[in-house]
């Protein structure tokens, strides 16, 4: 665990099977874009622009979820998540700049849909726990494919920070949310699964509408 990981969590990691299936489904939508027939350089730039917008409101979005936390452990978790995630959009912007691109003013439709879905997940914390479970457990399924993309597009370290940081940090974040859900999922399984499904669909939506031209 990194120095910035949550110190108080137990090592009790019992993955929630239904949420694992959703995380893998989301990863499966992403995988072809990382592989040999995936992004060319122009499409990778477009992906970075989408990820800039996708993560631009992370701080606000996590705070919104955290406002529904009803105990100290959950409040601490969302505060920690906010610190971990809130600056990541800048990595996408800087990576894009290194490749001669600039982020768009226009927010891609799939990102607008994601924001709308997130802020409509309801009043319990459980939908957000399920949603975060899915997001944070995508990266573990595409570790090799991510590194293959770096090699195939010959990306230097300053051109791949957004993807590289997520490939690494989300291994820790994924375990942390599994640990948390081991203890909270049974309080409201249907809300957790609803949040997980909603976020899986949002992630798939990014690639459904992603330009392949
Ligand atoms: Fe993360």
Image (cartoon, rainbow, N blue to C red):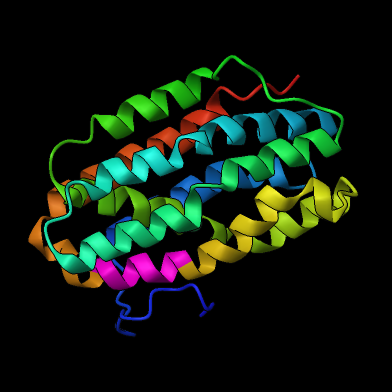
Q: Is residue 137 magenta?
A: no
Residue at 42 percent of width and 43 percent of height = 59
Q: Is residue 100 left or right of residue 161?
A: right
Q: Nearer the viewer, residue 112 or 23?
A: 112
The residue sitting at 39% across, 52% down in the picture is: 134
Q: Main secondary structure of the magenta part?
A: helix
Residue 125 location in percent, x, y? 18, 50
The picture places residue 136, in percent across and down from the top left corner, at 45, 57
Range drawn in magenta: 173-181
Q: Position of residue 55 (x, y in %)?
A: 52, 39
* Residue with the most extreme left position: 187
Is 179 covered by the magenta stretch?
Answer: yes
- Residue at the farthest right position: 154
Q: Is residue 141 above or below residue 94?
A: below
Depth check: give the residue in front, 13 or 91: 91
- Work out whether 168 lies above or below 3: above
Assign the C terminus to one quadrant of the image.
Answer: top right
- In this rendered view, identify the residue nearer to me: 8 or 134: 8
Return the residue found at the far bottom: 11
Q: Is residue 4 left or right of residue 96?
A: left
Residue positioned 66% across, 48% down in the render: 162
> How many numbered callouts?
0
- Look at the image and tell me whether residue 38 can be seen: no
Residue 204 is situated, as x and y percent measured from the top left of the image, at 48, 35
């Amino acid at each position: 665990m990194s120095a910035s990981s949550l110190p108080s969590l137990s090592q009790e990691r019992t993955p929630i099977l239904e949420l694992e299936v959703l995380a893998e489904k989301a990863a499966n939508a992403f995988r072809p874009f990382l592989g040999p027939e995936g992004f060319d350089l122009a499409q990778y730039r477009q992906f970075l622009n989408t990820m800039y917008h996708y993560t631009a409101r992370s701080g606000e979005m996590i705070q919104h979820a955290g406002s529904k936390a009803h105990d100290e452990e959950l409040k601490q978790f969302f505060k920690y998540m906010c610190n971990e995630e809130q600056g990541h959009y800048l990595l996408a912007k800087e990576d894009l700049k290194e490749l001669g691109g600039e982020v768009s003013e226009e927010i891609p439709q799939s990102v607008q849909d994601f924001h709308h879905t997130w802020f409509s997940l309801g009043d319990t914390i459980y939908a957000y726990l399920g949603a975060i479970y899915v997001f944070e457990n995508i990266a573990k399924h595409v570790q090799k494919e991510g590194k293959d993309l770096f090699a195939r597009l010959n990306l230097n370290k300053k051109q791949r920070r957004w993807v590289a940081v997520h490939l690494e940090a989300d291994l820790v974040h994924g375990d942390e949310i599994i640990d948390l859900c081991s203890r909270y999922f049974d309080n409201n399984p249907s809300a957790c699964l609803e949040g997980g499904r909603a976020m899986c669909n949002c992630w798939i939506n990014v690639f459904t509408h992603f330009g392949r031209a």
